[in-house]
């Protein structure tokens, strides 16, 4: 699924002006606890979180995620925006809840990220 499709499905906006919205996303994981994110294979995936600080971008970078989607209308601080730009990780934002965001993407066919050890 392309980032442009994710934007439409989740009623999100892209906060990264130079983002390539044709990038492919192959899976999704949602969490506000960044240590949980690292337990999953998020390569070419989407991280959905309500954590609006640079740690979310750093975690996405370590996990090789394609993009970060902030749920619940969170507004990223300038240092998060700058880090997203520096790491070329598009930052998206939606006003809907994390639960509904995940549900919409699941119904649209985006699979969940798989745990590194094969077990959740």
Image (spheres, rainbow, N blue to C red):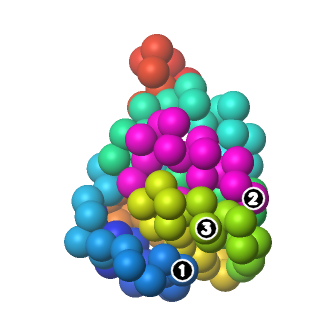
| Residue bearing mark 3 | 82
- Residue 87 seen from this side: yes
What label does residue 53 carry, if any? 2
Mark 2 and mark 1 lie on one chain; the one further toward the N terminus is 1
User: Is 43 covered by the magenta stretch?
Assistant: no
Q: Position of residue 23 (x, y in %)?
A: 27, 64
Q: Which quadrant does the C terminus fall into?
A: top right
Q: Nearer the viewer, residue 11 or 57?
A: 57
Q: Position of residue 41 (x, y in %)?
A: 43, 32
- Residue 10 seen from this side: no
Residue density around tag 2, few if under 14, some if 14–19, many if 20 or more, within 10 Å: some
In the structure shown, which secondary structural element does the residue marked by tag 2 occupy? loop
| Residue bearing mark 1 | 15
Give the residue displayed 37% in from the left and 74% down from the top. 19
Mark 3 and mark 2 lie on one chain; the one further toward the N terminus is 2
Quadrant of the rendered image containing residue 35: top right
Q: Gap between marks 3 and 1, in whole Å?
A: 11 Å
| Residue 99 relative to residue 52: left or right | left
Quadrant of the rendered image containing residue 96: bottom right
Which residues are the magenta region?
A: 53-69
In the structure shown, which secondary structural element does the residue marked by tag 1 occupy? loop
Give the residue displayed 50% in from the left and 44% down from the top. 61
Q: Nearer the viewer, residue 120 or 60?
A: 60
User: Is 60 covered by the magenta stretch?
Assistant: yes
Quadrant of the rendered image containing residue 110: bottom left
């Amino acid at each position: 699924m392309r980032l442009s499709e994710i934007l439409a499905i989740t009623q999100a906006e892209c906060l990264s002006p130079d983002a390539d919205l044709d990038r492919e996303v192959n899976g999704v994981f949602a969490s506000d606890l960044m240590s949980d994110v690292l337990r999953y294979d998020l390569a070419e995936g989407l991280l959905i979180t309500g954590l609006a600080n640079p740690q979310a971008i750093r975690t996405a970078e370590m996990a090789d995620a394609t993009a970060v989607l902030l749920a619940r209308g969170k507004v990223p601080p300038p240092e998060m925006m700058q880090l997203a730009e520096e790491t070329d990780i598009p930052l998206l934002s939606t006003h809907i809840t994390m639960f509904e965001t995940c549900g919409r993407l699941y119904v649209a066919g985006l699979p969940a990220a798989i745990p590194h050890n094969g077990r959740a």
